[in-house]
Amino acid sequence: MIEINLLPKDYRKGSGALSLGKTGFYAIGVAAGLVVILIAITFYQMHQLSTLQTNIEKANQRATMLRSDIRVVDALMDVKTKIHRRIDAVEKLDRYRSTWVRILEDVARNVPEFVWLSKFEEIPPEPLLGDSALSDLAQEIGGAASRPVEIRGYSFTLNALAAFMIKTMRSGYFDEVELVSSEDKEVMGEKAYEFVLSCNVHYLSEEELRNLIAQAGQGSDTKATHKSLN
């Protein structure tokens, strides 16, 4: 039997067949190329992220090591500062060793009966210099002629406290002696007065004293020379 298909040419193909043509193949090629490019970019970015993460971990490790080093350096600087302070304190004590011995001996002689001291402290602020020529010369050679100090103690009577203040005023080591405060206290069942005195203590090391004497001698010689010339 002979069958004749009278349908148009485009309708003669089976319904499941797909005709792409050249344009379709080009579109598929372009899409495949884009997919490959996207996959390549994705892998490249993943590699970059992995490298960045590695660098971040290394940077964090380095920062941790640096923090440890900084703590060590800070501790060493603190130790250095403390050592310098101790050295300065030792040098100062050694410089004025004999002077402070004389000052404390003078204080001990000035303490009358019924008075005892609990604290003798030098006040840190700037040195207070007097108006005398000796103080001016001491400042010129770099030595402070006086420093403010605070004296604390107890007295059973006001007369004994007054006697201590008078003796301190007459001392060659102290001036501007003032009573800062006086409060009633009970000490060992007895009434006493807790007092605080402020004053200036004058001191010079033996080296500074020799320099002052030498400079004073040179100054007097210079003045005598000018007078003789005039």
Image (spheres, rainbow, N blue to C red):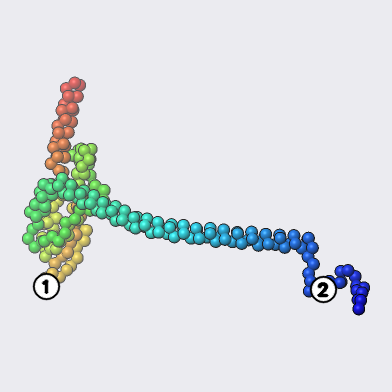
Front disc: 2 or 1: 2
Residue 84 position in % (x across, y down): 23, 49
- Above or below, 129 relative to 228: below
Residue under the image location 20 percent in, 46 percent down: 146
- Local SS, label 2: loop
Residue where numbered disc 2 is placed: 14
Q: Is residue 40 left or right of residue 105?
A: right
Q: Which mark is residue 92?
A: none
Can the viewer see residue 114? Answer: yes
Residue at 21%, 38% in the rendered image: 141
Q: Is residue 171 visible?
A: no
Residue at x-position 15% and y-position 43% = 205
Label 1 neighbour load within 10 Å: few <14, some 14-19, many 20+: few
Circle 2: residue type: Gly
Which quadrant is the N terminus positioned in?
A: bottom right
Q: Quadrant of the C terminus?
A: top left
Q: Mark 1 — residue?
A: 189
| Relative vertical location of residue 146 with respect to residue 180 in this rendering, above or below | above
Q: Callout 2: few (<14), some (14-19), or many (20+) C-alpha neighbours within 10 Å? A: few
